Image (tube, helix red, strand yellow):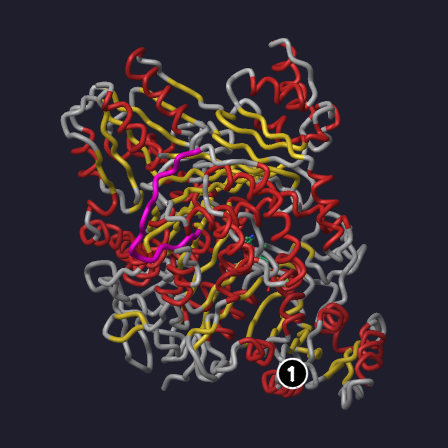
């Protein structure tokens, strides 16, 4: 049996850019981006921020283990200042970023955190993220058993709890308050680590709608289903545009 | 009869608008123009100019000498006084301005010009520069702009600062009077150029005033034109060519001189009438890395996709280009070439990125690289590139030099319809289920499937025919060879005559070897030289990959001298010819100061080379 699923293993840091091109060109597809914390929040952080600004209907899952696993455990952008995981020659000289706060201020309209050892909870959150209309982000906490000897399963198990957060925006004036509350909550970390949906807002127009403002036939007509030729003859006529440049 | 007219002024003072106005007037009188826009990487203040060469016949090259220099402030005089042959229109009030006051001129250039003047016994004011010109037979036309415009301001209710901005219209209109172009055609063009009523009125007054300053001094031939002509630049033609070729997605990050293409497409993105009309989606991305990778993503869905950039952006795109090569993605990258390295000469032209385009990206993968040789050709090349990308399922780099991107030329409208152009989408499979995207069919080209059609995998790693990562040796060899094979297929299928052309008599002993934007100026140079028995022919390459090695070897056979002519330091095109054919050039004429080649200097340099066997001539016009 084959699932109607395709995969694109992209360049390190660039998955969001690939995914955006795919989703914009064919909005009929459901597009999920899987990236590491180094990938999505380090080398590709520019794309991460921009995806929020567009509110494009894609889901970004960041598998956050605090290290660059594949390259043997260097510090990732989420590792905290002064921490020294197993393969670091010196303690981390950079501060860690707060992915939830970054996503919120970038414009993601669904922002959540999940814990990979709570598979049921995680699945539920991912399902909600994929269903969300707009750019959604899930920070997935996951121990790296090989290189992260600080944020281990035991470490997380003691701290992670399901937080009941009231992050749903119901009307526009609500919006700023909810973002601020969610950011405040996202700083809860050392003793207790909340997982769940921090923020959800379906009032912001998704990118498809913004494009429709310029191209009324979108997303019904889109780049991937556009007919560009008939028996080889281009369907696009540029003769009017050329004639507009007439000087005689 | 060929006339060269130049207008200059500080950026932001309407130099472009007035040049467009002049160009339109001249074209509507039946002449053909070749206009070149030169500007600084600056928004307001620095010197920009627009040079227009026009004639009743075809104009193919830029020249250095200008017949009429139209100015309305002193700096343009200091920048151009050595080029003027016949007339200079200038601000009388600026006569006493010293070159030291030309604040926006680079200080060393100011010094060069001052030294030039004093060494010849002149002072360093604008008036002295004018005297330098008049001593050499140039007629000086002083205009009291302020006085003239103050009078206009009595009839027009606009602040004087606004009125003062119509100096350029005065200069344009005076130039037209000089050329004997009717006042009506000037006024009519102003009416159709300025939609805003009070601006139209202002400029009509300015034109009346300007026209009365001068009398006809040129005897232009009367020309009658029976078919439509358009005035367009390379940026617009690239956009139109891609659109005609079925472009549906373009991503870009702003950079000179590429962005104008994308903005033009976006402005005209709706194709047809009614709410169901298809559109071209144009996305301004966060950087060029995103631009290329979004375009790749879009291409994977089956949409014809492209991006447009210039040197620094193309550098950032290298990694994506490599991924596209590995995954056999049809992708067009329009690479506008400007002067490098780094930001180099960001608004000037060059041919420095040929080798980069041929090698950008890590690893080995097939790619198609073509360079347009004149403005008109950009249209067909851009449409062609869209086909090549899908036919060979690989990235295509279309090089367009700034000298073509920002050149405005008159083209017969009918030449921009390519009736035999057919969209060729290449090998496409409509199968569903588990898809073998990279199946080997012998010629290197696999049946292409689109995301959403079934189950497909892509990876930048080496992979099997389903796109799953595989490293074992026999697969690696088979896949590598399959990918590279398509370059042989393309080489077999794309006619060599479309990739390299030869001009001039086959028995001319000396061969000029060149590529890209230099073709026009070289053809004009050939016409001049061949009258003098300095016999040369021209071999002009358009496509470097797949490289027409056999044809180039044949065309270069029997050359006494083979002279490379290029806008770069290391004769990159010639080096590539040597690599692919073993044939070396004997002499080089090179220019890398950011300016296009001017006819005069090319003719002089060719004489030096052919008559004196000068090995390497560097042009600095
Ligand atoms: C341009 C580029 N630079 C560097 C690499 C090497 N590289 C591969 S994965 C990786 C880091 C991965 O870290 P993360 O995204 O956190 O994923 P993890 O392995 O921890 O799951 C790096 C630096 C690369 N593939 N491409
Ligand atoms: Mg990681």
**Residue B438, how many percent across, how many down?**
30, 66
Position of A154 relative to B607 (above/below): below
Front residue of this view, candidates B138 and A98: B138
Question: Magenta-highlighted stretch: main secondary structure?
Answer: loop
Residue positioned 32% across, 53% down in the render: B412
- Tell me where residue A35 sits by quadrant: bottom right
Q: Position of residue A55 (x, y in %)?
A: 64, 75
Residue that label 1 marks? A122
Q: Residue at x 24, y 29 (%)?
A: B582
* Magenta-colored span: B218-232
Q: Chain of mark 1?
A: A
Task: Please name the residue shown 41% across and 23% down the image.
Answer: B601
Q: B345 above or below B491?
A: above
**Label 1 CA crowd tier, 10 Å (few <14, some 14–19, many 20+):** many
Magenta segment includes A65: no
In the visual, does B95 lie left or right of B383? right
Decide if residue B562 is on the left or right side of residue B492.
right
Q: Is residue A118 above or below residue B203?
A: below
């Amino acid at each position: 049996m084959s699932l109607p699923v395709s995969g694109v293993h992209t360049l390190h840091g660039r998955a969001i850019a690939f995914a955006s091109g795919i989703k914009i060109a064919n909005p009929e597809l459901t597009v999920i981006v899987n990236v590491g914390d180094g990938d999505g929040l380090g080398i590709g952080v520019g794309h991460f921020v921009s995806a929020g600004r567009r509110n494009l209907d894609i889901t970004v899952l960041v598998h956050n283990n605090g290290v660059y696993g594949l390259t043997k455990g260097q510090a990732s952008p989420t590792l905290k200042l002064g921490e020294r995981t197993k393969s670091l020659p010196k303690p981390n000289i950079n501060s860690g970023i707060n992915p939830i706060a970054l996503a919120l201020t970038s414009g993601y309209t669904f922002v959540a955190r999940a814990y990979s050892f709570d598979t049921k909870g995680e699945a539920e959150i991912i399902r909600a993220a994929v269903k969300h209309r707009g750019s959604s982000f899930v920070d997935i906490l996951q121990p790296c058993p090989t290189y992260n000897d600080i944020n281990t399963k035991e470490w997380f198990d003691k701290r992670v709890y399901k937080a009941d957060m009231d992050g749903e925006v119901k009307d526009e004036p609500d919006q700023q308050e909810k973002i601020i509350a969610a950011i405040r909550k996202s700083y809860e970390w050392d003793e207790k680590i909340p997982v769940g949906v921090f923020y959800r807002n379906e009032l912001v127009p998704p990118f498809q709608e913004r494009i429709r403002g310029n191209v009324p036939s979108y997303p019904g007509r889109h780049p991937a289903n556009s007919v560009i030729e008939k028996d080889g003859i281009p369907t696009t006529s540029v003769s009017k545009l050329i004639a507009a440049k007439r000087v005689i | 009869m060929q006339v060269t007219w130049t207008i200059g002024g500080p950026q932001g003072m309407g130099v472009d608008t007035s040049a467009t106005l002049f160009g339109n007037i001249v074209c509507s009188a039946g002449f053909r123009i070749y206009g070149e826009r030169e500007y600084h990487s600056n928004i307001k203040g620095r010197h920009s100019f627009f040079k227009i060469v026009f004639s009743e016949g075809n104009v193919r090259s830029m020249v250095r000498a200008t017949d009429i220099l139209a100015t309305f402030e002193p700096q343009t005089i200091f920048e151009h006084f050595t080029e003027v042959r016949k007339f200079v229109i200038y601000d009388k009030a600026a006569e006493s301005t010293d070159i030291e006051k030309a604040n926006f001129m680079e200080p060393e250039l100011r010094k060069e010009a001052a030294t030039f003047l004093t060494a010849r016994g002149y002072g360093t004011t604008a008036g002295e520069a004018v005297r330098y010109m008049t001593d050499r037979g140039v007629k000086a036309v002083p205009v009291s702009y302020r006085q003239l415009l103050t009078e206009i301001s009595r009839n027009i209710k606009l602040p004087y600062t606004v009125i003062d901005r119509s100096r350029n219209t005065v200069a344009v209109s005076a130039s037209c009077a000089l050329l004997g172009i009717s006042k009506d055609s000037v006024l009519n063009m102003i009416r159709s150029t300025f939609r805003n009523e009070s601006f139209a009125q202002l400029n009509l007054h300015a034109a009346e005033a300007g026209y009365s300053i001068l009398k006809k001094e040129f005897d232009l031939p009367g020309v009658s034109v029976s078919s439509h002509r358009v005035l367009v630049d390379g940026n617009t033609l690239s956009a139109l060519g891609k659109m005609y070729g079925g472009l549906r997605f373009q991503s870009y990050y702003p950079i000179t001189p590429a962005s104008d293409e994308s903005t033009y497409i976006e402005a005209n993105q709706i194709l047809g009438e009614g709410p169901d009309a298809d559109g071209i989606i144009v996305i301004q991305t966060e950087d060029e890395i995103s631009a290329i990778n979004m375009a790749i993503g879009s291409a994977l869905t089956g949409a014809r996709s492209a991006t447009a950039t210039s040197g620094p952006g193309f550098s950032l795109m290298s990694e994506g280009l490599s991924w596209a090569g590995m995954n056999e993605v049809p992708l067009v990258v329009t690479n506008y070439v400007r002067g490098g390295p780094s930001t180099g000469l960001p608004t000037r032209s060059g041919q420095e990125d040929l080798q980069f385009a041929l090698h950008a990206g890590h690893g080995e993968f097939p790619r198609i690289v073509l360079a347009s040789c004149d403005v008109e050709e950009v249209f067909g090349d851009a449409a062609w590139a869209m086909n090549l990308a899908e036919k060979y399922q690989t990235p295509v780099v279309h090089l367009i030099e700034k000298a073509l991107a920002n050149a405005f030329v008159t083209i017969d409208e009918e030449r921009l319809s390519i009736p035999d152009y057919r969209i060729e989408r290449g090998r496409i499979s409509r199968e569903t289920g588990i898809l073998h995207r990279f199946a080997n069919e012998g010629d290197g080209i696999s049946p292409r499937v689109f995301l959403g059609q079934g189950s497909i995998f892509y990876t930048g790693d080496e992979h099997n025919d389903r796109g799953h990562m595989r490293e074992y040796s026999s697969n690696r060899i088979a896949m590598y060879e399959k990918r590279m094979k398509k370059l042989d297929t393309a080489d077999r299928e794309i006619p060599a005559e479309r990739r390299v052309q030869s001009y001039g008599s086959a028995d001319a002993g000396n061969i000029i070897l060149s590529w890209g934007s230099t073709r026009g100026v070289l053809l004009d140079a050939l016409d001049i030289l061949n009258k003098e028995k300095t016999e040369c022919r021209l071999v002009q390459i358009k496509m470097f990959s797949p490289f027409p090695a056999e044809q180039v070897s044949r065309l270069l056979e029997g050359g006494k001298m083979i002279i490379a002519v290029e806008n770069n330091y290391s004769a990159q095109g010639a080096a590539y010819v040597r690599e692919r054919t073993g044939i070396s050039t004997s002499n080089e004429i090179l220019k890398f100061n950011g300016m296009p080649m001017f006819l005069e200097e090319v003719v002089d340099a060719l004489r030096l080379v052919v008559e004196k066997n000068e090995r390497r001539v560097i042009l600095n016009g």
